[in-house]
Amino acid sequence: MGEFAINFGVGLIRAGVCLYDFVTYPLYAIFLQPWKESKLMNRQRAVEHPVSEGLCYHNNDPPHEFQVEIRSANITTVECALSYACRKHANKKAVGTRQILCESEEIQKNGKVFKKYELGEYSWLTYKEVDELAHNFGKGLRSVGHQPKENIVIFAETRKEWLISAMGCFKQSIPVCTLYATLGDEAVIHGINETEVRHVITSHELLPKFRIILSKCPNVTHVTYFCDQLKPTDLIGYKEGIIFNSFEEIIRKGERSDFSDVPPTADDTAIIMYTSGSTGAPKGVVMSHYNLVNSIIGYAVGLNVTKDDVYMAYLPLAHVLELMAESMMLMFGVPMGYSTPLTMTDRSSKIKRGTLGDCSVLRPTMMAAVPLILDRIYKGILEKVESQGPWLTKLFQYGLDYKLNWMRRGWNTPFCNWFVFRKIRLLLGGRLRLVAVGGAPLSPDTHDFVRASLGVPVLQGYGLTESCGCATLMDEYDMSTSRVGAPLQVCDIKLVNWDEGNYRITDKPRPRGEIMIGGANIAVGYYKNPEKTKDDFCNEDGRRWFRTGDIGEFGEDGSLKIIDRKKDLVKLQFGEYVSLGKVESELKVCPCVENVCVYADSTKNNVVAIVSPVQKNLEDLARSLGKEDLRREKLCLDEDVNKAILQELIGTAKKAKLEKFEIPGALYLTSELWTPDTGLVTAAFKLKRKSIQIKYQDAINRMYAS
């Protein structure tokens, strides 16, 4: 079909839709009453609050009934909160895991062999059963010699056993030290040795790492592991003197023991959470029980959870975002089905062809996500649409623009939802009503695309490990992009001048400055690091504050926008400031980009980019250029391929309206995939800039020389 015919066809559809809008406008206006939603969109979300320094905003909404309930019950510890939830929702479904029926090998078109799962239905534990297992697990730890107030490490993937183990530790006042499952060996050794633990909890999949790790961790004497559904766990080849127990064995020991629970106090340490360490060795953030309870209360109010929700749990529980989300779901009695990014959809890489992914079986209504996941959904759907040809691509783009236009005015589009986006919604089960996003900036294109194509509010939030993940959150009526919402009710947000970066609270038209978060959710500090604690935490105006290092600006409605980060800001030769993180978040939506690191030399007047490309798109581009050798290493060095991808990158940058000096002037394609194992990204997939610069310094020099 020619370009003229496509445009003519779309034009006819536009005309028909305009006629439909004209005829149905009065009916929709009466039925939807969009002025009510428009009023909620434009409401004042936070108000100024007096402080001794800076400009502070405070959420002035009335207390939510959930807040009142928790305060009235005098709940001040996570143990008390979760025990309360288990009593309240005793017979409801709590946590579910799919049974692995079998594992088989599937030969791909390129000849590679992938292992695939065939999965059954979800098997559920009730709240009462979870509480009983946690009670016995905690007693089991005591029976093998673990003492209250003695640290323990959990180094495992997200699964029900992780949560139950942590709950059992809380019942015995045992501080839980969390380490990402994707951390490299050196970071794991650092966390184990710094916390001086004798006991490590891990999984069947990660246990083999300890054949090397244990020789460098002299304090460790006990290892508890979560079993695999299909394979027995091999315990041969480990350091002598280590006592191994499975998760089930610890529970059985607890059932036979006479130990009682040792409830913690509000000021006791609940978690020492190790951050992913983008600028060096991971730091342990000390969170008290009271910190975490306040964070749970804050997010529970912001997300408007209902008793009929179903939550999909798949993000790392060692990350504060998922830990808070799951704790909150427990408080509301929401069933949580466990998943992984490799089994989430029918097309996920570990799902056997022709069988159902986790979303199709669980049909969740809520999920948390990080921008990386949503970027992949965005690119995947676009690739699928574009493969159907230019006619459907243009039609889909028109449907997307049409829906966004009406959504921003407070209207729903039921027919557009059905004809254009119904199959996309089914990819995630068809019942999704809310997605919460955090962990990194979400690009405006991805934000708009996901909220329109899935037909759900995509609520971007902001928080750090040091604030127990809690700071701000968009509400479901906020249709903006690039913002992270107003302060949650348990904390205040203030901006203070950062003169070096030319950001001040007196700036017009918006006040700008370094973001500080204050409230009962602010962590105690960094573990065994009083100097860094003193630098980043302080007590002012009757509350504890954390200096984030992020630069923000307040909107007229009191919502916050992250515009820079101190460490990501580089001043170029002619005085322009470039925010590397901002540029990268815009370039990541380019279809050919798997990951990108932007580098700026302060003696130059432009930036350059190091790109790890998407393999399929790289091969498709190479074929269009007549290349016969499709090996990744070969293509990344090909001059024609580099030029073509640079042009795509420039086009994406111009579409995002980046300044001329923010657009990469040169490009280097790396054949290496950036995973935590390479040391180039953190466990949360944040860039390790210094490591990347050191590795690619020669390439950076060549780019600037050219």
Image: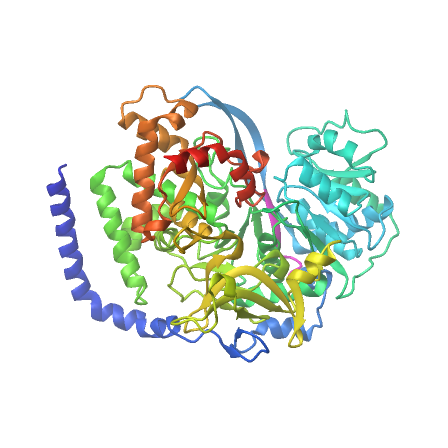
Q: Quadrant of the C terminus?
A: top left
Residue 181 seen in the figure: yes
436 sits left or right of 84 in the view: left
Q: How is the image coloured?
A: rainbow
Give the residue displayed 29% in from the left and 70% down from the top: 31
Question: In the visual, does 635 lie left or right of 331?
Answer: left
Image quadrant where residue 66 sits: bottom right
Residue at horizontal 66%, vertical 55%? Answer: 127
User: Does residue 413 sit above or below 585 in this rendering?
Assistant: below
Image position, residue 227 (x, y; %): 69, 35
Query: What percent of the width, then of the height, locates residue 55?
Result: 52, 74
Judge left or right: residue 172 versus residue 354. right
Q: Is residue 12 above or below residue 105?
A: below
Q: Which is nearer the eye, 563 or 574?
A: 574
| Picture residue at 66% right of the left edge, 64% below the top | 537
The answer to whether residue 85 is visible is: no
Can you say which quadrant of the picture contains the N terminus? top left
User: Which of these two is toward me, 642 or 518?
Assistant: 642
Q: Nearer the viewer, residue 170 or 606?
A: 606
Q: Position of residue 485 (x, y in %)?
A: 47, 65
Residue sitting at x 40%, y 66%: 478
Count of number-bearing discs: 0
Is residue 216 found inside the magenta-colored segment of the image? Answer: no
Q: Is residue 203 left or right of residue 332?
A: right
Query: Hey, which quadrant is residue 538 in on the image?
Result: bottom right
Residues rendered magenta in the picture: 89-97
Decide which of 623, 497 is in the foreground and name it.
497
Q: Position of residue 377 (x, y in %)?
A: 41, 44
Is residue 91 inside the magenta stretch?
A: yes
